[in-house]
Image (cartoon, rainbow, N blue to C red):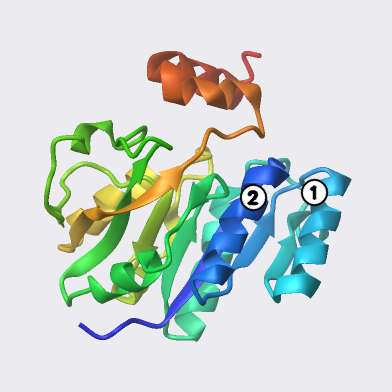
Amino acid sequence: MAEQKIHIIMPVKDSIETTEKAISAIVASGYTVRVYDDFSSAETAARLDAMHKEMGIEVIHLSEQIDSPSPNYRWVLQDAQRRALKDQASLLIIESDVIVGKDTIKRMTQAVEYEVGMVGAVTHDVEGQVNFPYLYAKNMTEDGECKKHLSFCCTLLTNRLLQAYDFEQLNPQKDWHDVDISHMSRKLGFVNVLQVTNPVLHLPHSSRPWKQLKYTNPTAYYLAKMAIVFDWI
């Protein structure tokens, strides 16, 4: 299948060291990226602006667009969808703690067939082992249809899916939307594909200390995540 036209986006909330590695890997593979700076520190914002000048990446500082506190994933997805549809492109989300390989993006776009709604790349740790959030796929040996939800660590949303599902419908009470979009893709009749032969490196995220739990204690991680959502802590 021919390579698809894509827009690549990366939501960023500090963690500048992993963010720089993630952005550099995308640029090194021959692509550019639009970074959504979700109210990061002044230091992070300045470094992103410097990378814009050095590498030609696009940077959108949400502090100049909206006044709602982070996380603002819903706003980012809606803005990215509008831009992709205007350009007749698919949308590739790469999170700031994910390092792509030289051919990762090309292989993801080449996996798009007519019936495909989403393509996800499985995540590995530094030792090459499948890690969170794809532990359910650790025994998979071939790329194929995924009936569980795809994480947005490194996931392509096809233009046909973007045309079929308006992100204005995303629940404003939620901060994360990978589960809902994955389920909606399948509900609309699309096939979601997980590429286990095209892994990406998923580094421990340092933007918030509690995020480290997702690599060692997923249950505690989700409890901490819910505490943030419901303002328990």
Secondary structure found at label 2: helix
Query: Left or right: where does residue 11 sit relative to residue 46?
Result: left
Residue denoted by label 2: 19
The residue at the point 21 percent across, 57 percent down is 192
Q: Is residue 6 visible?
A: yes
The residue at the point 64 percent across, 50 percent down is 19
Asked which quadrant contains residue 131, the reply is top left
Amino acid at pointer 1: Thr
Query: Residue 44, which numbered label?
Result: 1
Residue sitting nearer the eye, 51 or 63: 51
Amino acid at pointer 2: Thr
Residue 6 position in % (x across, y down): 44, 77
Residue 45 position in % (x across, y down): 81, 53
The image quadrant where one finds the N terminus is bottom left
The residue at the point 53 percent across, 65 percent down is 26
**Mark 2–mark 1 CB contact (< 8 Å):** yes
Query: In the rendered view, would you say 163 is above or below 204?
Result: below
Using the numbered discs, state the Cα–Cα distance from disc 2 to disc 1 in whole angstroms. Answer: 9 Å
Circle 1 crowding by C-alpha within 10 Å: few under 14, some 14–19, many from 20? some
Residue sitting nearer the eye, 30 or 171: 30
Circle 2 crowding by C-alpha within 10 Å: few under 14, some 14–19, many from 20? many
Residue 60 position in % (x across, y down): 72, 64
